[in-house]
Image (tube, helix red, strand yellow):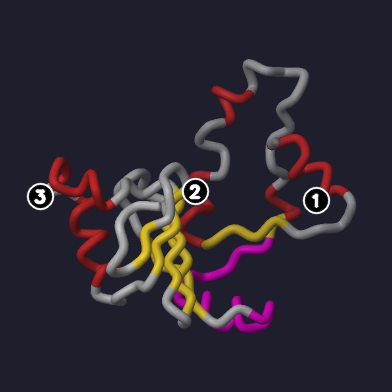
Amino acid sequence: MIRIGLEIANLGATIVVVDIQKDFIHFSDPIFKKDKSRFIPIDETKIKTVSIKESRKFLSETGITGELIHTPGHSDDSISLWLDEGSLFVGDLNPLYELEAYKGTQIAETWEKLLKLNPKRIYYGHAKKLEKNKTEE
């Protein structure tokens, strides 16, 4: 998967990185290097860095009405996508049904901030979608 993304970048697509993620780009390189046949490190000269504070403007230029939100917890560089229509994409952030186990942690603080948005739908990277007033689908 990493190689495919870089092959696409080599064809002219731009890899977009949010500023808070830039210092983490090569964090997992030592792990991925073990698979020498597939791993190609990201060439930082080919990335576009977007400020998290300017994410609304950047997304608007692509036709998306929403913003990127720094959501540390799973990792320090985690971000989530909030769409103004009420959808929240949280990626690797622990699902709400696990929140009780994370009381007093950064994960709980991040969820507190996100829930103030009153999302209609929450999309997880590794769990089923959650819709307001519905149970897990």
Q: Nearer the viewer, mark 2 or mark 1?
A: 1
Which stretch is magenta?
Answer: 48-63
Q: Of the two numbered discs 3 and 2 on the same chain, state the one appearing first in sequence.
A: 2
Report the residue at 69% width, 37% height from top.
Answer: 2
Amino acid type of disc 3? Gly
**Along the viewing direction, whichever of 13 and 135 lies nearer the viewer:** 135
Residue at 29% of width from left, 76% of height from top?
A: 118
Residue 24 in the image: above or below residue 88: above
> Would residue 62 be counted in the magenta stretch?
yes
Distance, label 3 to label 1, CA atoms, is 41 Å
Counting residues from the start of the chain, the first of labels 2 and 1 encountered is: 1
Q: Which mark is residue 23?
A: 2
Q: Residue 121's spot in the image, x, y percent?
A: 40, 67
Question: Between marks 3 and 2, how big is the CA–CA gap?
Answer: 27 Å
Kind of element beneath mark 1: helix
Residue 9 bears which disc, if any?
1
Residue 133 image point, x, y percent: 28, 68
Q: Nearer the viewer, mark 3 or mark 2?
A: 3
Residue 93 sits above or below residue 123 on the image: above
Q: Which residue is mark 3?
A: 104
